[in-house]
Image (tube, rainbow, N blue to C red):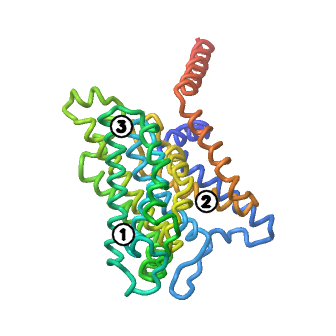
Amino acid sequence: MKSVKDWIKKISKKPLFLPLFSVFLVLVINVIYDAVQGNYIFSFFTFELKEGALYGRIVDILNRGSEAAILAIGMTLVVSSSGGTDISVGSVMSLSGSLCCMLLAGFGVTHVRGPEELQMPIWVGAVAGIAIAGVVGLFNGFLVARMKIQPMVATLIFFTAGRAIGLLLTNNKMVYILLDEFKWFGLGKTWIFPTPTVIAAICIALMVLVLRFTSLGMYVQSVGINPRASRIAGINSAAIILLCYVICGLYAGVAGIVATSRIYSADSNNIGLNLELDAILAVALGGNSLGGGRFNLAGSIIGAYTIQAITTTMYALGVAKAQAPVYKAIIVILIVVVQSPAVKAYFAHRKAQRESLAIAGRS
C-alpha cells in the first residue's frame, strides 16, 4: 500500500497541482478571515439571485478577473512559443478602448449621451478596437519572429507608446459613451451572469476548440522547445511565433473593450494598468515555464482567477491598492525561482543523493 508521502509526491507532479493548490490556499485564507470577523465561515461560497442577476463573492471574482483571464490565453501562447513575455498587453487594452470610443464619439467629442450622437454602430467601434490590437500584435510578432529581438524589448515599444497613442486619439481627454448598449460589454448581464464572464468563457472555449481540432498547440510547444529543430522538421517557426503574438494582441483588444465598457469611457492612463503583470503571473502560477515549451492553458486560466481572488483577499485584509503589485511581484519572483534550472538541478541532485544512500544502506 502506498504511503501518504508517495501519494503527495504523485499529486504534486500533476500539471494543475500548483494552480489548484494556490486556489485552495486563497479559499482557506478567506474562510479564516470570515471566521475571525464573525461572519458565516462559508460566506465566500454563497450565491444570491437579485433582479435576475447572480451575485456572490465567487461571481465577483469571475467577473473582475475576466480581463486577466482573457489576457492569460494569449500570454500563454506567447510565452510557450517565444520563451518571452508580451509586456505591452495592458497598454494595448488602453489603445483598443481609446480607438473604439473615439470612433463612436468622433474626434474631439468628449460625451455621447444618446444613440443619435454615435458616429457609427457600437459593434463597428468594438471591432475596430480589437483590430488595432491585432495590428500591434502583428508588429510585436514581426520584431520577435523576423527581427529576432528579445520579446520583452520588442514589446517594450508599445508598452510605452500604446497609452500615448490612445491619448492622441482622444485628444488627451476622457471620452464618455453613456449608452446602455456600450455599457453592456462590461456592466451588463447575459441571462443571469455578468457579461464579462460570458465573454471570457467564449474566448476560452474558442481557443480550446482551436487547440483541440488543429495542430497549433503541438506546433507552439515544438517551436518553444527547440525552434531550430522545428524548422528542420518542416515547421515555420517564425510564422508560429508571429501568429501567437497576433492572437495575444487580439485577445488584449477584447479585454480592452470589456475594461473600457466597465467605466463607459476611454481612460488611457488607467485602462489595463499593471494587467500585464497579472497575465504573466497567471501563466507562471498555472504551472507553465516562462522559458517556453510545453504549456497548460487550463492552468493559466485558473491562475488568472486565482490572482483576482488574491487581489480581492488582499483588499479585504486592508492592503492598499497601490501596494498590491508589490505582493504580486514577490509571488512572480518566488515562482520563477522555483522553476529555474538551478533550483530544479539542486533538488534533483539531493534526490539522487538520498536514493544512493538508501541503496547503500540496504546493501
Q: Earlier in the sequence, mark 2 or mark 1?
A: 1
Q: Quadrant of the C terminus?
A: top right
Mark 1, other Cα within 10 Å: few <14 / some 14–19 / many ≥20: many
In the picture of the structure, the residue carrying the numbered disc 3 is 144
Callout 1 touching callout 3 (CB < 8 Å): no
Of badges 2 and 1, the one in the foreground is: 1
* Residue 126 - label: 1
* Residue 309 - label: 2
User: Does residue 353 appear left or right of residue 199 in this picture?
Assistant: right
At horizontal 55% and vertical 71% (from top left) the residue drawn is: 59
* Residue 313 - label: none
Where 171 falls versus 105 (above or below)? above
- Between marks 2 and 1, how big is the CA–CA gap? 28 Å
Q: Quadrant of residue 208?
A: bottom left
Mark 3, other Cα within 10 Å: few <14 / some 14–19 / many ≥20: many
Q: Earlier in the sequence, mark 1 or mark 3?
A: 1
Residue 86 place in picture, x, y as percent: 44, 45
Q: Taking the image as drawn, is residue 174 in sight?
A: yes
Helix, strand or loop at label 3? It is helix
Residue 162 place in picture, x, y as percent: 45, 53
